[in-house]
Amino acid sequence: MNHNSEELEIVGSAIATDADHLGAEMVVAALRAEAVQYIWGYPGGAALPIYDALIQQDEVQHILVRHEQGALHAADGFARATGKVGVALVTSGPGVTNAITGIATAHFDSIPIVVIAASVPTSIIGEDAFQECDAIGMTRPITKHNFMVRKVSELASVLKKAFYLARSGRSGPVLVDVPKDVLLDRAPFSYSQPVRIRSYRTPSAGHSGRIKQAAEALARAERPYIYVGGGVVLAEAADLLKELVDLVGFPTTTTLMGLGAFPGTDDRCLGMPGMHGTYEANMAMHSCDVLLALGARFDDRVIGNPDDFSRINRTIIHVDIDPSSISKRVRVDIPIVGHLRSVIPQLMVQLKRIAIRKDLTDWWRAIGEWRDRKCLAYDSAGEQVRPQAVLERLHRITNDDTIICSDVGQHQMWVAQYFKFRQPRRWINSGGLGTMGVGLPYAIGAKLGKPQSDVIVVTGDGSIQMCIQELSTCMQYGINVKVLCFNNRSLGMVRQQQHVDHRGRYAHSYMDSLPDFVKLAKAYGHIGLRVETEGDLDEALRILVETRDRTVFLEAIIDPGERVWPMIRSGMGLTQMLLNEDDIG
């Protein structure tokens, strides 16, 4: 970094200097201390001091997106793929408001990102100045915490707290709002002080008594079930989960956010539960007598109607790092607050000390009968491109290190059902908020974070148009991702719900005008392909997967009448599944 004053001395994550530095220089120095490699952003007047400091160094690379929402999603995708903190930079006013959706998306899925937002000078805050908005007030409900820095002397300690809060405990987004005059003010800089935040404690080990209770309940269970959420992925506990399942041999289900935490190809994995989950996963969830929930939230898309779910007499063990998530939607019998990398080994120690019921023959027989319903079967006859078949073939020709970044809609559910993830952090999608448009910027972040992995976007003709401008970002920085776009000329999931719940009244879910995606991809400088028949599918997928030096956009034309089955209507219980068209009343 080129400074007019003395160069900052960096030792690991500790930086200290007695010389005065601009606030903008401190921001960049903090990023260097945190070993930040990439920051995604879009410049504007209030943020220009930071951009001026960024261009005078080469350790932190700035990626210029085409919309601030893309910056947040790319930082989010980087964090999901790597487990590191993603960082985004936006300017005041519309820069912050454009970032709101990305912040909320990360918040709902507990993804660690730090958002640096430049704002108007402190002297005109509250005067409705040009591009002024209340970033703190707007983001308070959708961040783990947010800060406004009013003195340059506080900037370094606030940034250090922001990174610590983002990655610790239940991770999440943290926003730091920095007025322009603070960025242009000077003070000595130190990044060596330890972080101390009053009343903020992150749990590690679980309560030993409750863990013993949990082990005893699991040991005597006749119909045990392990319910795995995204918390297992965030905790880097997939290896420990595998050890636990190997020890007890219990059937296991992984939520949309938990896919890959346990191998989808393992016979003990019943697939995904919930609204578009498998028949066997939902019936086992409904019928089990002891349910072990690991890093899951019992959200509405998983358990359906909570009153219906709670009418069954079962023992529920819930392990989560966030105590506010326990007994939030359903009553829990054995609550355990702790980090899964600590709690799972504690639980295994207790299980090894007592005799676990080994004969689960009747339970597995019941599961086998539910599996025999073959709820994911589909009609593969004819030349029509079937999205289910596309994803099954894609799974066969890709390796375990391939990262799939999904948008939101039918295509998202088809991936969750037919692509059998075997490792964590290979499935990147918006679960809690369900944000359309995330797929391509997610892929940009994931590819930069995991450059040796193939990164494939699975999207639809509706979702891709929300952030399609980021194809320009891919070209500028040589970020070679693959895009598989299912084109059914409609908002597929909206259309399906209108079909099921609104007697086929397709109000504004059909797109009368679509771009030629192949020509559009080529206009951005990429490879564009289209497949319309099943016979052309294998060659198109081969090009998609084997091309390494270019971004490839493959458009697959599918029938607007394709549905995602099974399906549970909103407000219904787990056993009230629609398995096919014939079940619609």
Image (cartoon, grey):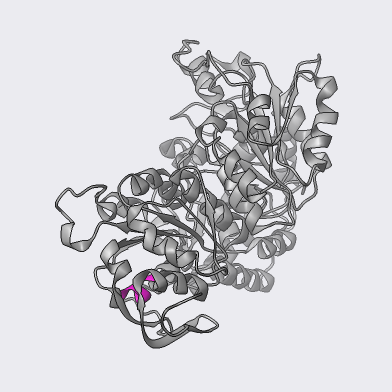
Foreground residue among 118 and 252:
118
Q: Quadrant of residue 342?
A: bottom right
Q: Residue at x 56, y 60 (%)?
A: 234
Query: In the displayed structure, would residue 504 be above or below residue 574?
Result: above
Q: Main secondary structure of the magenta part?
A: helix
Q: Is residue 567 left or right of residue 518?
A: left
Q: Is residue 121 left or right of residue 532?
A: left
Q: Residue at x 60, y 35 (%)?
A: 412
Q: Residue at x 23, y 60 (%)?
A: 121
| Res 443 visible | no
**Outermost left residue:** 127
Q: Can you give x and y, in whole percent of width and height, for residue 108 in the image?
A: 44, 49
**Outermost bottom residue:** 18
Q: Quadrant of residue 522?
A: top right
Foreground residue among 332 and 39:
39
Q: Read off the magenta span.
A: 154-159
**Outermost front residue:** 4
Foreground residue among 557 and 328:
557
Q: Can you give x and y, in whole percent of width and height, for residue 305 in the image?
A: 44, 35
